[in-house]
């Protein structure tokens, strides 16, 4: 019984340490965003926001197409029986969606 208690306590301390480490990394990543954005002048940041705002509909449509192509690829890979030609075609569709070629 004491061995199980010691094992349980050890695992609890391990998981608490692991969670604390993950939280520390997330906080560090949040600090990088303003640092990266601060590397550019206000004019460049405003220009980027303008381009993103002007192309919002096209950007969202491209993301939807990419998500759909990746979903199709995942379904094709899991299909039984496995069809290599269909997977190759689905991979090509994902590449086209990534590049934005139409």
Image (cartoon, grey):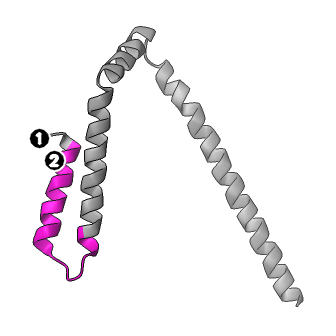
Q: Are marks 2 and 1 in contact (CB under 8 Å)?
A: yes
* Above or below: residue 52 compared with residue 95: above
Provide the secondary structure element on which disc 2 rests: helix
Helix, strand or loop status at disc 1: loop
Instruction: Name the residue carrying label 1.
Output: 102
Query: Within the image, what quadrant is residue 17 found in?
Result: bottom right
Query: Residue under circle 2?
Result: 96
Q: Is residue 83 above or below residue 91?
A: below
In percent of width and height, residue 98 lies at 23, 45
Where residue 80 sits: x, y (%)?
23, 81
Q: Residue 11's image quarter?
A: bottom right
Residue 53 is left or right of residue 87, and the answer is right
Q: Disc 2 versus disc 1: distance between alpha carbons?
A: 7 Å
Q: Residues within 10 Å of mark 2 (few under 14, many from 20)?
A: some
Segment colored magenta: 76-98
Q: Nearer the viewer, residue 61 or 35?
A: 61
The image position of residue 97, as x and y in percent, is: 20, 46
């Amino acid at each position: 019984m004491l061995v199980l208690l010691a094992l349980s306590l050890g695992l609890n301390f391990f998981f608490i340490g692991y969670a604390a480490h993950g939280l520390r990394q997330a906080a560090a990543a949040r600090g990088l965003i303003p640092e990266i954005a601060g590397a550019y002048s206000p004019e460049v940041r405003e220009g980027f926001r303008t381009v993103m705002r002007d192309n919002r509909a096209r950007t969202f449509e491209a993301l939807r197409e990419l998500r759909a192509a990746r979903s199709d690829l995942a379904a094709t890979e899991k299909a039984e029986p496995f069809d290599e030609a269909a997977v190759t075609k689905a991979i090509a569709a994902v590449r086209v969606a990534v590049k934005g070629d139409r």
